[in-house]
Image: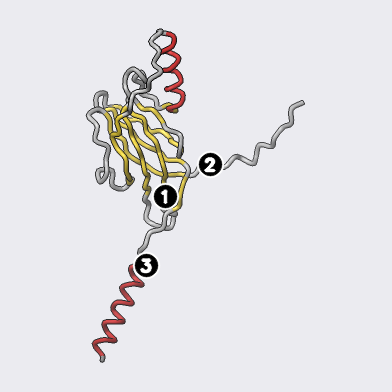
Amino acid sequence: MNLVKIAALASASFLVVQSASAVTYEQNESATLRALDKITGRSTDFEITVGEPMIYGTLKVDLKVCYQTPPEEPPESAAFLQVEATTASRVKTMMEPRLASEVEREAAEAGRANGRGDDQPEEPEMLFSGWMFASSPGLSALEHPVYDVWVIRCKQPSPESLSDPAVPDE
């Protein structure tokens, strides 16, 4: 009988310890990513918002969701990213990240100006689709011969400053 009580007590204490160590995450609207061009050795940090894909070089990076632990817990950021390869005909190589919609609009305008009629979009190649963790960038990484991309942190957009009162137009 004593053995049963000890086993029950041990399993109950295990559940208490396990639930106390559970990490909670808060969903955020944007993330800071770092991209490395392996050819030039240049790294660039850029902000990306959920649902607004960015173009970096020949990559189209789309943040689907980003979670950050609260300040009282060990720091961790987890982001679900999808990275596609874009073709040289759709995007000229650039090192500054830009919104994908801007780049695609410019590419379409350039195609019309050249008389090529690039109305048939090419199927992009999915290079990565999954979770990336800021504390373990090698755990789930983008494998690309030219670029590396990893998560630095997730964050909420900064609130508007209340110190500047709205001035009505006269």
Amino acid type assigned to the residue bearing label 3 in the image: Ser
Q: CA distance from mark 2 to mark 3?
A: 32 Å
The quadrant of the rendering that contains the N terminus is bottom left
Q: Earlier in the sequence, mark 3 or mark 1?
A: 3
**Which SS class for mark 2?**
loop
Q: CA distance from mark 2 to mark 1?
A: 15 Å
**Which SS class for mark 1?**
strand
Q: Nearer the viewer, mark 2 or mark 1?
A: 1
Q: Is residue 155 above or below residue 101?
A: below
Whether the residues at callouts 2 and 3 have beta carbons within 8 Å, the answer is: no
User: Residue 123, position in %: x, y?
Assistant: 33, 27
User: Residue 145, position in %: x, y?
Assistant: 22, 29
Residue depicted at 37% across the width and 37% down the height: 33
Q: Is residue 136 above or below residue 19?
A: above
Q: Earlier in the sequence, mark 2 or mark 1?
A: 1
Residue assigned mark 2: 158
Q: Nearer the viewer, mark 2 or mark 3?
A: 3
Is residue 95 found left or right of 28 in the rendered image?
left
